[in-house]
Every structure is written in C-alpha cells, then in structure tokens.
Image (cartoon, helix red, strand yellow):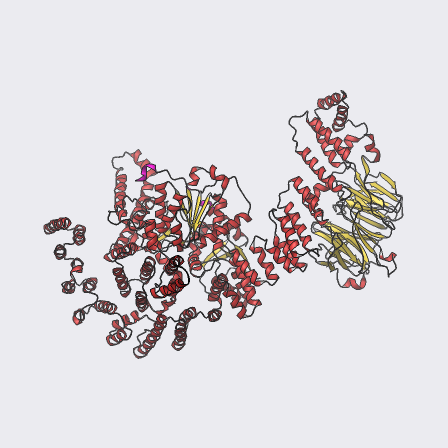
Amino acid sequence: MAHSIRRDSPELPDFSLLKRLAKDQLIYLLEQLPGRKDLFIDADLMSPLDRIANVSTLKQHEVDKLYKVEYKPIVSTSDQLCFLIRPRLQSVKWICDVVNADKAAGKFRRYKLIFTPQKFYACENVLEEQGIFGDVTTDEWAFHLLPLDDDIISLELPEFFRDYFLEGNQRWVRTAGSALHLLHSLFGPFCKVYGIGRCSKMAYESWREQVEEGEQNTGRDGEIGSVFLIDRDVDYVTPMCSQVVYEGLVDDIFRIKCGCVEFGPEVTSSDKSLKVMLNSQDKVFNQIRNEHFSNVFGFLSQKAKNLQTAYDKRSGMDIKQIKTFVSEELKGLKQEHRLLSLHIGASESMMKKKTKQEFQELLKTEHSLLEGFDIRECITFIEEHINRQCSMIESLRLLCLLSLTENGLLSKDFKSMKAQYLQSYGVDHLPTFANLKQLGVLVEQPTGETLTAMESKVGKLVNDRTAGKLTDAFSSLAKKSHFRALSRRLNLVPKSDEEYDLRVPKDMAYIFSGAYVPLSCKLIEQVLERDGWTGLEEVTRLLNGQEFAASGCSEADGKARNDTRRTILVMFLGGCTFSEISALRFLGKEKGYKFVIVTTAITNSARLIEALLDNHA
Amino acid sequence: MAFITANWNPLGEAFYRKVELYEMSWVLRDGLRDSLVAAAPYGGPIAVMKESRCLSPSVRPQLEIYTASGVTMATFPWKSGPVVLLGWSVSEELLCVQQDGAVLIYDLTGAFQRHFSMGQEVVQSHVSEAKIFHSPYGTGVAIMTGSSRFTLATNIDDLKLRRLPEVPGLQGAPSCWAVLNQDRQTKVLLANGPELYLLDNTSCTSVVLPGVCPQDSVFVHIAVSFSYKYLALFTDTGHLWTGHAHLQDKLSEVDTKIRSPPKQMVWCRRPQSQQPSVVVLWEQLLLVVAVGGDTVQYPLEEACVCVGELDGVRLLSPSRHELLQEVPLVCEDIFKIASMGPGALLLEAHKEYQKSSQKADEYLREIKEQGMLGDAVRQCVEAAGHEQHTHTQKALLRAASFGKCFLTNLSPEAFVSVCRDLRVLNAVRDPSIGIPLTHTQYKQMTVQVLIDRLVYRRLYPLAIEVCRYLKTPEYQGVSRILRHWACSKVQQKGESDEVMVRCISGRLADAPGISYSHIASKAYDSGRTELAIKLLDYEARSGEQVPLLLKMRRSQLALSKAIESGDTDLVYTVVSYVKNEMNRGDFFMTLRNQPVALSLYRQFCKLQEQETLKDLYNQDDDHQELANYYVSASYREKRLEARLSVLQSAVDEYNKAKNEFSSKATEEEMRLLRFQRKLDDEKGAGLLGLSLQATMEALLASGLQKQADHLYRDFRVSDKRYWWLKLRSLAKKEEWEELEKFSKSKKSPVGYLPFVEVCMERSNKNEAKKYVTKVTPEQRVRAHLAIEDVEGAAEAAIERRSEAEIGAVISHCCSSSSSSSSQRLLLDKLQRALTTANRK
C-alpha cells in the first residue's frame, strides 16, 4: 500500500466567499425596488436561496411575503411584486399572465423580474410578445455557484443535463463558462486545464473568451492548481449503478436536496420529519459519508460506545469538574448524541430496505453486468423485474446499464423488453424510449448483416488495408460506447478472485463494493498521473475523442506553491454522483491531492432517468 | 530678462499681459469686418463667413474654417439659407444657425453631419438673434425670434426645445440678453431699456440690480463669465456694473466715460484671480476694466474679435492672435522687477551659475537661509507651466532643476509632470497644429479630450505620439485613435475593398481592444457593404458581428457566426429575426442546415408553439419525431375519439418511419383504449388510460377474471407476467383455495418460490408451507428460510453442498437472537458441512 509516500492534502480555499458575493448582489438587486414588496420564487430556487439569504435577511430588505411560483393566479395585495426565477419560458409566461390579469382588473403594480443566473433573450422575447416588456423591469442575479460543502460547489442546474445532452440546447454552456470564470477570478489563476467531451470544450472556450475580454489580473497566487472538465456522457455507466457508499445511499433513498435531507418519521423515531444538513459540519456524518455501507453500522455502534464512556465520566466527578463538564463538553456531546441517533435511525431504515434479498440480487446483477458474466441471467432478472412491476425507474436503469455495458441490446431482446415495459407502464413511454435511444443509453445493436453488407460493399472499392481500417471505423460507429474495451484497458473491474476488504479499501472500486472503479474518476486519476492525455490515445478514441489539455498560466507555473498545484478542481458538466465524489476524496487521500468538485447538479440514477422521461404523467 | 515684463500692464494690484500666440497665416479678403466669426474656446478652430446682409442675394458666401493659427482646414460655398450665427459645440462641431431656425452641423473638415430645427414657429418669424452656450449638459442653442420670443435647446445631442414665456410689456427687441446657467437651470436674462427680466421655463421675473446708478440708465450689453458665475452689464451712460450672476451681490461699478455701445464684452479672469476684469471692445479700442476700477486701454489698428477663455481672453485680428490674461501670481513673483521672491532669486542664481559666477552661491545661500528653497523650486516649476515661450520655460525649468540638487526630500512629481505637459503643449501649440492651449486650460480639459480634438483634426500620428509619450493605456489611447483612423479611412472613396482591408488590418493588427464591428458599421453606413463584411471577419467577438450582419440582411452568415460564438442568446436573436424575415419554407430550410439553431427553436416551439413543431417535423420528413409528437399530443386530448385519431396519425407516421415496433405498440394501445372504454361503459370500472398491467390488475381485483384472461390472450402477455399478477392478486384477496387451484392449473412459469413469498407477505405460514416442496432445488433453501424453517433450510443446504447457501443459513442463524440448544447443534452441523464443502 502506498501509505508511506502519502503526502498531506493541501488546505481548501474558502469558498464561502461565493455565498457572500451572491448575497450582496441579491440585496443590491432587492434594494433596486425600494419599499415593501412581495417576492415570488421558483420552487427549485427555494433551497439554494435559503443557503444564501434566509427569510429574516430578506425581511430586512423589505420583502413582505414570500411565495412559491405555482403557475396559478396570485393573491398578493402588495403593490410591488418581485419575481426571482430561472430563465424559463414557462415562468415568464406565467408572469405575463399575472401582469395582464392586473391590467385587465385596472390594478397598478410595479413588477421586477430577477433572472438567475442570467437572462435569456428568449425570455425577453416572450415579455415582448405578450406586450408587457415596458411594464416590468428585468435584472440578472449572477448567482452561479452554491458551495454545498467545503469541497462541493453546485451550479444547481439540474436541467443542464437534459437541455444539453438530450435536446442539444447549448444555452447553459456559457453559464458553465461564466461559473468557471468566476472561480478563476476569485481563486485562479489555474495552472493546467484538462478536459474531455464536447461540452467541456465549449465551456472551456467560453471561459477563455471571458478571460480575454475582461481585465487581466496577474501576479496573484492562485489557490487552485489544475482544472479537469468532464462531460456526463463520457461516463453514463457510473451514475447508473446503485450507490452503496453512505452518502450516496442516503441520496438514493432519501434524496439529498441542496445539501439537506428530510428524514421521515421512520428515521427520527418520532411523529414528525426532520430536515438535516448533511455536510462536513456534521461530525458524525463527516466520518461515515465516504464509508461503504457495510462498515457504517459497526462504526456507529463504536461511536455510541465512545459517547457513553464520555457521558460516564460524569460519575465520580466533583462539583467543579461537573461544572466544567457541563459548560464545555456536554453541549458537544449532546449534539453528537443527537446526530448519532439520527444516523443510526437512517442506517436502520436503509438496512430494512437494502439488505433484503432483492437488493442483494440487484447488486449481483449489476456486478455481473459490469463484469460481463452471465448476461442471460441478468436479462432474465431484468425481465422479471419489469414483469413484477418493481419500479418504473429502476427497471429502466437496469435496461440502460445492460445496454451501456453490452453496447446495446440484441434486437430480439430489445423489442421484447420494450414491449414488456410498455405493458407494465403504458405506451406513453414510447417517447421516453426515443429519448433514451437518442442519448445512446438504451439502444438496439445494429443487426450484423447490414453492417457486414456495407463493409463488403465498401471493401470492394478499396484495398485490403484500408478495408481493415474501415472495419474498425464501422465497428466504432456501431458501438458508441466501448465499455468492455475501456474496462480492460483501464482495469476498471478488479479481479474478483481476491477477497476485497471494504474496511481498508485499496482502490476506488470500494465505492461499488470492490466490483468496479468508476470510469470518470479513473480517467481523472490517469490524466493527473500522466500530466496529460499522452498514452491514453486508445482510451480517448473509445470515448469519441474531444479531449484537450492546456496550460493556464505559464509564468506562475514554476512559482506556484506546491500545495496549490495539488488542489484540483473537477467540473462535471451534466451532474455527478456522491459516489464519484467519495471516490475522488479517496483518490485525493491516497495521492495527496485535494479535489474540489464543481457540478451542474448532484445527480444519481433516478434523477438521470427522470430527466429523460417523457411520459404524460 | 527684463523684457519679459515688457508687455505687462499694472491693473490694480495685479498685472495684465498680452502675449502673442501666432502671426496669422490666413489671408482674409476683407479682414474680420462684417463677418460672422466663431472661435471655439480652448484654442479651438475658427469659422468665418461674410454676413449675408452685406452681400447681394445672388452671391453665395464662403464658409471658411481655420485653425487658431490661421491654417485653412476647410472652405466651401454656403448653399443654404442666410445664417444668423456661427458657433462651436463642445466636441468641436460647427453649428450654423439659419434665419429660418434650422441649425446645420458640420464637422471640422466641413463635412455636413446633420441638422435640426428650432421649431416651426421660427420659420415665419425668423431668428433675429441667437446664442450658443456650453453647460454641464453639453452645447445649447438659444434663439430670439423676430417677435422677441425665446426658444432654448439645452443639449443639441439630446434635443428638447423649450419655449420660454413671453415678457410682459416688451415692445420690439430687447436691448440686450444673455443665457445664464443657475441651479442646474438654463435661464435668459434680458434687458428692456432700464428693466431687467429673468426668464426661466415657466415664468418671467422682473429683477433689479443692487446698486445701479444712475437709476434709469439703459442696459446695452450683458456679458457672462466663462464659468457663469459673474455678470457684467454696460449701460448707455458708460457705466459698467459687475456682480454675481445670481444678481444679489454687486462687485463694483465703474464709469468708463465711453457712451457708445461696445461691440463685444468679455470677462477676463483666471482661477484664483487677483483682479478679475471685463474686456470691452469697441471698433478701435480695447478697454480692460478691473473690478477694482482701474483700467488699461489698448488701441486697436484693425477689427478684432475677443474669445473668452477659462483663464483669459484671446484677441483675434486679421494679422495676429494674442492672449490677454492676468499674470499668474507665481510669474509675477519671479519676473516682477526687483522681485526678491525665492523663485526670482533661484532663477538669478542659476543664471549666475551658468556664467560660472560665484554670485550663484550667494543667491542660493540667501534662499536657503530663509528656508525657501523648496518654495523656490515649486515656483519655478509652476511658472514654467504658465509661460508661452519655450526659452522662458527652459530657463525656469533649468533653474528648478538646479535648485532641486540642493534639496533632498523634494518630490520630483510636479517637475516631471510639468515637463511632460509642456512637451505636449508645445507640440500642439505649433503653428502647423494651432491649438494654443494654456496649462490651466489643458489641465481643465484633460488629455483625453485633447486627444479627441487631435483625432477630430485627423492628426492621428501626433495623437498616437502623445499617447505613447504619456504612456496612456492602449485601450484609451492608441487603440482608440486607430479606431477613429480606421473609421474615417473606410469612409474614403476610391480604394478597393481588398486594399482597404489589408491596410486597416495591417495597421490595427497588434492593437488591443479594437472593435472591428464598429469600423465595419461605419463602412456599411457609407454604403460599402462588402467592405463591412470583410472587416467583420477580423472581429474576434461574434457577439459584435451578428447585429451588424443582421442589419446588412446577411442572416445566413449571421446565423453561422452566432452559432460559432456558442452564445445561445445570439443564436436565438438571429432565429427570431430570420423567422420574421423569411417565409416559413425558407426559414425551416435555413434551420435544417444548422442543428444547433434547430434544436433551440424546437425547444422553444415545444413550450410556445406546438403546431409549429409539427410543421417543422413535417418539413423535415422526420416521421419518427412526428409520431412521438402525436403520442405525446394524444394525452392532451380529453375525448377518446380525438385521442384515438391522434394515435392513428402516430401509427401512420411510425409506419412511414418503418418503425414497426412502435406502430404495433401504438395500435395495441388503441385497442386497449377501446377495450377499456367498453368495460368502463358496461361496468363503470374506471380503466381508461391505465397501462395493460394496471388494467389487468384492476380487472382481477374486481373479480373480472374472464376479461383479464381475454386481455392476457389478446395482447400476448407473457405467462410469467400473468402468473405473477394473478398469484399476487389472489394472495391480496387472501383467496388461498383459488391460489392452490391456480398453482395446480399447470406448471408455473415463474417457479413456486413466488407462491411462498406472496403467502408470507400475508404472513400465512401454513399456506406457504404447501408450496415449499414444489420449489426447485436451487431455490429450496431460500424457500425454507422464507418460512423461517431453519432446519429445513439447513437440510436442503447440506444436501446441495453449496458453500454459499450454507453460509446464508449460518448467517441467518446468527442474526436470529434465540440460541436454544437445538440451534447450536444445527450450527455445528452446518459448520461441519461447510468445512467438507470447502475441502472439496
């Protein structure tokens, strides 16, 4: 093990600055509309906003009442309305209706629209078409980045994934570029930038453009060394797997929203739900978040014992000692106690769900798929899964995983599975399948004949050597993702004959019970190790290329403190999972890096699939 | 250097001097008499035109524009109507106010820029007098019509005409008037004989000057100071009243003893003036009247024009151009005869030093003894700034530099900056350039403006030199100048596009912050579209290219540039523009070649215009997407018939797309919908819209076995699915007999473990047991465990000799807390079996 050469990971930059900036700007914007006003907020902006400015801050700046945007007529009596929304046409249209309704009723109010993180021309166009462009004022709240934790920064744009990867809409690319620009201007200059994927490249270019347009500030010591940009479509396999690391599992089961989770009565063992912030401030959570689930219970019980000992110290203390104990330690212990019981509750509740036979079988199937063994059995399992109507989302996830690892389903299987799925969940899922196909996560293998026929046809026209190359080209056309080849080349699936000790993980595979090293994280590891893409040509070819590497600041390169260079910013375009974050944290600990994860949103298999649903519900 | 004071005249406590700026190089046919003359402040250009009333109507006067040194900049015959007044705007544009109220604007080269009118009313009544004034808001124009009504425009770049109220009791024209700027308001002060009125936007107030005597003398001339702070009025009795512009404080009143009305009257003062004065001009006499009451007279040989400046008055005559100003205090201190000021001593010391005389030391000692050396240096430096002649400047700067040597802690900044300023000032004062700026004016107007002025005069090389010399940042300096150069370059005719582009791009190549789009738009404005397009290619920011391309109706090019930029807003701008510009077919064709724009538009349509989306797919013959569209659309239809017909369209499209699978699936959905409808009508089952599975489930739940079976056969539902469904539904209703019957109906395609499981879900162990024996050997252990029959499980596991299964049983044993002796026995047995299995 490489423990001996482990270097200490560097300190992280203080990202709370981003919050302060966003807060100041929001307050400034609110003050642009002096006087009392009602504030309407997009539903999905509620939690991010809460992290920036809480209700009392808003009240201080003369916000009277807060409403959620619900696309219904409003009941506000205020004569000033402020709307804080994402630049979505639907919201803008609703606002137009509100304004026009007021007009029809002869009511005069002032309206202010604050778009975040930016406004789009299309939105203004709608205002214009609906004839209220002159009645409202618009503004932008450049709230690009929300630090969810010490090392996680989110753009909180879940729609990025569908917009870019499915619809081919590039409107958020510039936003990503701006986010990078913001980080660069606050914590840069960056020394190296690596990236893979088309979107990454565009975001990188957009950022460069903004750097060139803006003021140059050189001579500052950057706090971030390298940047790694990665598109979600480089690796769909990883997010399609069930998560078994504590934090990921909590996300899969309870859904962590904006760094906050709501534990239901079954966890809190009382009759009400409880919202809990999950981040490094929570000392108990911080210790178990990256652990494989099988270790968590043992850890928690040990912790409980320790806590008991700490409490027990009380007996045998004299009055003075007790006084200090109460004033200094007790509060911490109480706090820890509360957290501990919460996490034990959560673990129990998850245990109930996840150690069932079915879950074990599900994991087994996933692992078989990743390894490429017993595919027939897997297909049977998935079929049964569909037939028994276990879960609409889960079934689709398994189908996708099958297709991704096997480079598509055989035509026969594809049709029968799809037919069965439609029988289970309705024909309105036809567009959903079209979406999955377009994205390339659930496809039919092209029938061998058509391809061979084409090859031989072309083969006749050219000589043998070129024909060989052509075959390669064709097969790469046919198989968009070469998961098997990649897996072999990057050694993603560790040999299964050795026992994998999950307590002392030896590589990133531990986040999937030792069955699979996430492709995305492996790529990052490799590129950092090689300081570029050299030697990975085959891999990038299999991933459809689009990789790039650029050095940011030439002169600062040599001077930059060693610490800085080992702070690495990883930006996931299209979202990343908690498992990937755990894997990177592990990698950081092993190699003495510190990773900062920037993502368009935290995602998991269910969120990905839900984003692609197009059924009518 | 006694001669420096040769042109000084004492006036009260101060001195006034008249310095020659230039020998005019112009050749004026009739001097300045009977001409309209306008000279811009801050050493600006001079415009001259014969007054129309002095010419026969058939003759066209010549409009001539000169630099302050008399070099011709432009000359052209005046072709428009009679002109009342010439004047200059703050950005050195020539304003020509015509009798009919039109104001024509020309640039320095005599090129017509634009025009505006001072109102309809003026066309009839004519402009009888006009004034051009400068305020913080820009350049304004005030006119008085033949019917003595005033109209104001405060800023010609943001034209808002204001007609001032009528003056009560005004018969005929007022004797004199002036424009005032007070409290951010523009007002007109006018004199009707002995009465004064102040006109503002809404009212006309009669005002009385404090302390005018004699009481009812007629005001014949009004002069406002450069800063609008002071006012001077001349009466027909030859009295000159001076005071503050707000008309409350009087400064003084001087009797000039000259009763004829003056031709011109201008304030002459400077910042921190000792002795402000008013310069009054008659045909042959120039009288400087100090506020203190002293006067200086200058006889004039030829007709003259005064130009008020911030720190003095310029006198313009056909042969000479002079500056009349109060001698700055420092200069006075240094050069006054027998002055013992520290600066004067230092200058003297340096002079002696150059002569290698030991007197230098004596002078220095004297200054140092008074501890005034620092002051001496400062005085010399400051005085150098105020001097016009280079040799005087040099002498003073050398002296300062000399004095500096004996000081240790003097900041060199002032010295350096004055040296720099003088270098620039001397360069622009050169007669070939002709901008006679004083140091005070230069500081007031800033380098930026000076560079602008050089650019207006197209003195690009000099402007660039100045910027480089002053190390002005490129964005504000060189780049800006090059942009102006390029803009004027593209407006020139005669050169081919290629030559022009090469010339411009070559010159601009390495200058940062150049906006090619700006230059291109200038080219487009002067009708050179092709040149504009070529220039746009050099524009790095696509965001700048697109709007101009759209303006030039190159929408295709604009679209591809927008896409290149990666800015979707830009793409959308072009798309929405193109949408309105083209007919639908062409529009769709355009989009078809641009997938990025297409996807953007599609997404927009999905939210805004569903119908357009359909057309879009239709146009592209994208049957697959069209079919998907119909499928989603079908769910928006409330009525079944409508839904079916939409689904039928989907089927047709799927067929066209050769997607048999989907077309079949859709057809089945239609069949299912009809079936559901039928049952809903018959039994009120509420099935419409459910999936096949859900339908069957609902049917079984409400005991409609036959109908469920019908669906099972009709839709070729797989046996497995149906069995799962049925056994679950039976268990749910706890119809255990039915379940048993069902299990025996034929061999179960899903095996018998599910039977055990559904029974256990209802906690019916007895029923579950019935099926355990039927379970296949592979699943038997699980079955036993499911009914918590550990012994059975152990038996089965040992029989199967499967390591994993034995392990599973062991872990099950361990997790259950009860530890009876039988269990321990069982555990031992299992362990042993495990070791045997292992050994194998």
- Of the pair A384 and B444, the residue shown nearer to us: A384
Question: In this image, B830 relative to B397: left or right?
Answer: left
Question: In this image, B76 relative to A223: left or right?
Answer: right
Q: Quadrant of the N terminus of chain A?
A: top left
Residue furthest to the front in view is A463
Question: In this image, A180 relative to B497: left or right?
Answer: left
Q: Is residue B521 magenta?
A: no
Magenta portion: prevailing SS class: loop
- In the rendered image, is residue B465 in sight? yes
The location of residue A190, given as percent across then percent down, is 47, 44
Magenta range:
A1-17
The location of residue B30, given as percent across then percent down, is 88, 50
Question: In this image, B213 relative to A4: left or right?
Answer: right
Q: Quadrant of the C terminus of chain A?
A: bottom left
The location of residue B665, given as percent across then percent down, is 34, 71
- Of the pair B568 and B207, the residue shown nearer to us: B568
Above or below, A191 relative to B756 = above
